[in-house]
Amino acid sequence: MKTSIITVILLALSALIFTPNTNAHGSTKPLHGGVVKVEHEMVFELVRAETGTSLYLRDHGKPYPSEKVTGSIIVLADGKKTNAEFNFAGDNKLTANTTIPDGAKVLVKVKESSHHSVTVRFTF
């Protein structure tokens, strides 16, 4: 009896160890050097730069067309709140005219025509 229980436990553990790691949403590896979050089965990559902020959208590992997507960004840093709107910048990219300092907390809200809005939280 002990032997069969131990065998079952070892088989279950080996199945967990040797099962390939798959992600139904595609890779969560940053493709543009930003911070990646997964919300509502989509991958959001927020990239900060000295001149502005970019948001890249992916769905199941493929670029998600963003021409019909609207959005806004709220940056909370040093006791201040900054708001900006995202603008279509081609393919799966949206840009906003705001910068994100170190230590900031960021809320991104995006919406596509008839779909409900999605809010994504980032920390830098």
Image: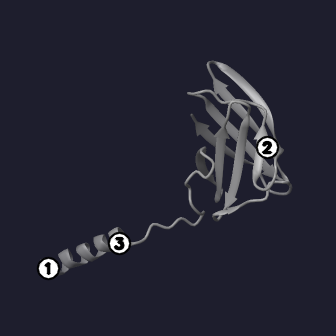
In the displayed structure, would residue 46 be above or below residue 112? above
> Residue at horizontal 60%, vertical 39%?
122
In the displayed structure, would residue 8 be above or below residue 72? below
> Residue at horizontal 60%, vertical 29%?
104
- Depth check: 4 or 52 in front? 52
Is label 1 in a helix, a strand or a loop?
helix
Amino acid carrying mark 1 in the image? Thr
> How far is the residue under mark 3 from the one under mark 1?
22 Å
Mark closer to the observer (2, 1):
2
Quadrant in which residue 29 is drawn: bottom right
Instruction: Report x, y in % for residue 50.
Output: 69, 30
> Residue at horizontal 79%, vertical 43%?
71
Q: Is 84 left or right of 76, judged from the image as shown? A: right
Q: Earlier in the sequence, mark 3 or mark 1?
A: 1
Instruction: Report x, y in % for residue 39.
Output: 63, 52
Q: Which residue is mark 3?
A: 18
Q: Which residue is mark 1?
A: 3
Is label 3 in a helix, a strand or a loop?
helix
Amino acid carrying mark 2 in the image? Gly
Q: Which residue is mark 2?
A: 71
Q: Which mark is residue 69?
A: none
Mark 1 crowd level (few <14, some 14–19, many ≥20, 10 Å Cα): few
In the displayed structure, would residue 92 be above or below residue 12? above
Instruction: Report x, y in % for residue 100.
Output: 66, 30
Q: Is 9 left or right of 70, judged from the image as shown? A: left
> Residue at horizontal 80%, vertical 54%?
66
Amino acid carrying mark 3 in the image? Phe
> How far is the residue under mark 2 from the one under mark 3?
41 Å
